[in-house]
Structure formats: structure tokens, C-alpha cells
């Protein structure tokens, strides 16, 4: 029995409880639904880091430079994942989604807009130490970048 | 009209389409459900980066060092977010979740286990260039770290 085979066994045993069955042997419809769930999941995580900073902007909670620095850094990591989770073109499937079909006609622009969110989130993280006014200005730029993508590629609400 | 106020207006306008209503004025039940959705969302993103590497381990797709390097780096960024999205103690709520109550009795250990996943994912990313055998060995260690957390803190399947 080869060493490689043993590694494979260990891996597959370890992963048997770690991955949902959707990953393998799934139908195209199941894969499309999983793609939508993953897309929406990623954006929920972004929102969870955004939320406290919005609360600060609305004066509902006190400005917290350390939290802004941390959460914006997380958003800067998450935003570049957006094009990854939108890679599967789900236009042909009957799905509940707010994603517009033109995403897959404009994948370069879509990726650019995600990159802009990431850059501005990194700038916000860096600006957090410069005080509330500087941070809130940088936060406005992040929000505008989010909106820029939603205006093009998400169902209008 | 102060400059700060103008910034705030710009921010709130930009964000009005960017955030779900759940973030503000939500009931405790709604916030708990949003926490579950966010937790599950984050893990779905992890799974989406994991999937191709599992496919390589199962010889369903060819080994791709660049993809392993990239995806493992993403998992290394995502794993430290796990304790963040599990911060809200939802034990008191009636929710559909596979998260076990003991997470919130052992938050330090839970965070340590997430940190171990992140460390091993970073090691996998670095090992990808060393060839398939080295990468698959490092991948086994990541899978074992996932399993270590699931065994303690997730409903057994």
C-alpha cells in the first residue's frame, strides 16, 4: 500500500464529515443552487463586518477605531472572493436570486468593482487610526463602491 | 451644514441599498436567525474553496498547484472569521442549526481550533509548490483540523 494512498485515505476520512454531499455527484441544478447559497453567504459575512461601522456612522454606537480597523481589513479580504463565488454562470437556471444576468456578460468589470471595494476597505482599515472624521470619509468611499456594483449587477430594491 | 454631516449623508445614501434591513431595528429572534445564516454562509464559502482540492484528492480532477495555493490561502483568511460570526450566543433561540451549545462554554478552545485550521491552510498554500504528495499531506492536516472542530462543536452526522 503506497504512502500516497494512505494519505488519501486519511484525507477522505477526515473530510467525510467536513463537506456536504453537494460537492460531489450533485446535479447541475443542485450545483447552481449551491452557488447562489455560497454567493449570498459571502455577502452576509461582508454585511456582518459592515454592520457595526454603519452603526457608528448612524451614531447608534460609539466610534471604535480598533473595530473599524479590524472589520475593514476583513472586508478587504472578503471582497476579492466575490468574483470567485460568482464564477458559475447560473443564468440558465430557475433560481431565487438578486444577481442580474449581466454579471456574466461583464465579468472583468464585475471583478474590477469588487477589487475597488477591497482597495477602499483596506484604505478604511488604515484610516481608522486617523480619527472618526477620516474614518467616516473612508467608509463613505467603501459604501459608494458597494453601491456602484449593486447599481449595475443587482436587482434594484 | 457641517462637513461631517455631509459625509454621513453620503454614507447613509450609499448604504441604503447596500445593507439588508436586518442590521437595524431587528428583533432578537431576527438577529439570532441572521447570525445562523451568516455562520452557515461563511462555512459555505470555505467549502467552495475546499471542494476543488477534495476533487484532486479523489483524483476526480488533476492536481493544480496554483489552485491549491490560492484556495488554501483563502481558507487561511476565512477560518479566523469563524469565531467572529459565532460570537452571538444563540443557545436561547429556537433555530435550525448544527452548532452545539458547548461552543459558547468553550469560546477560547473554539477560537483555537479555528486558528489551527487557518495555520494548516496557510501551510497547505505554501506546500502546493512542493508537488502533489506534499500538498496532499498538508491537505490531510487541514481536513483533520476541520474534523477536530466538527467533532466537538457540530451535531454528529
Image (cartoon, coloured by chain):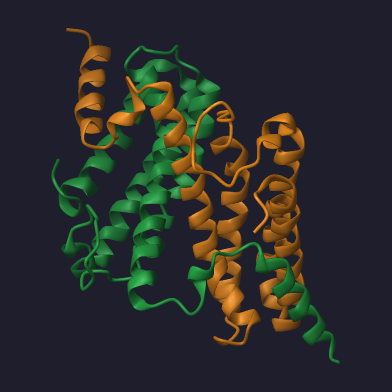
Chain colours: A green, B orange
Q: Is residue A16 above or below residue A66?
A: below
Residue farthest along the front direction in this orientation:
B94
Q: How many marks?
A: 0
In the rendered image, residue B136, in percent from the top left (x then y), is placed at 72, 76
Q: Is residue A65 above or below residue A90?
A: above
Q: Is residue B87 above or below residue A21?
A: above
In the rendered image, residue B1, in percent from the top left (x then y), is placed at 16, 7
Residue farthest along the left direction in this orientation:
A156
Residue farthest along the bottom direction in this orientation:
A1
Q: Give the quadrant of residue A35.
A: bottom left
Q: Give the quadrant of residue B62.
A: bottom right
At horizontal 23% and vertical 49% (from top left) the residue drawn is A149
Q: Give the quadrant of residue A102.
A: bottom left
Q: Is residue A123 left or right of residue B24?
A: right
At horizontal 57% and vertical 42% (from top left) the residue drawn is B81
Q: Is residue B23 left or right of residue A145?
A: right
Amino acid at each position: 500500500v503506497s504512502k500516497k494512498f494512505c494519505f488519501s485515505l486519511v484525507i477522505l476520512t477526515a473530510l467525510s464529515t467536513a463537506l456536504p454531499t453537494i460537492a460531489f455527484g450533485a446535479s447541475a441544478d443542485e450545483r447552481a443552487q449551491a452557488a447562489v447559497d455560497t454567493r449570498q453567504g459571502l455577502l452576509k459575512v461582508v454585511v456582518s463586518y459592515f454592520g457595526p461601522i454603519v452603526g457608528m456612522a448612524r451614531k447608534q454606537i460609539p466610534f471604535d477605531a480598533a473595530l473599524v480597523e479590524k472589520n475593514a481589513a476583513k472586508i478587504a479580504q472578503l471582497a476579492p472572493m466575490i468574483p470567485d463565488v460568482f464564477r458559475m454562470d447560473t443564468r440558465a437556471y430557475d433560481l431565487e436570486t438578486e444577481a442580474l444576468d449581466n454579471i456574466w456578460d461583464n465579468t472583468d468589470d464585475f471583478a474590477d468593482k469588487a477589487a475597488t471595494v477591497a482597495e477602499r476597505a483596506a484604505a478604511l482599515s488604515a484610516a481608522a487610526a486617523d480619527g472618526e472624521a477620516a474614518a467616516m470619509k473612508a467608509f463613505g468611499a467603501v459604501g459608494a463602491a458597494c453601491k456602484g456594483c449593486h447599481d449595475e449587477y443587482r436587482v434594484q430594491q
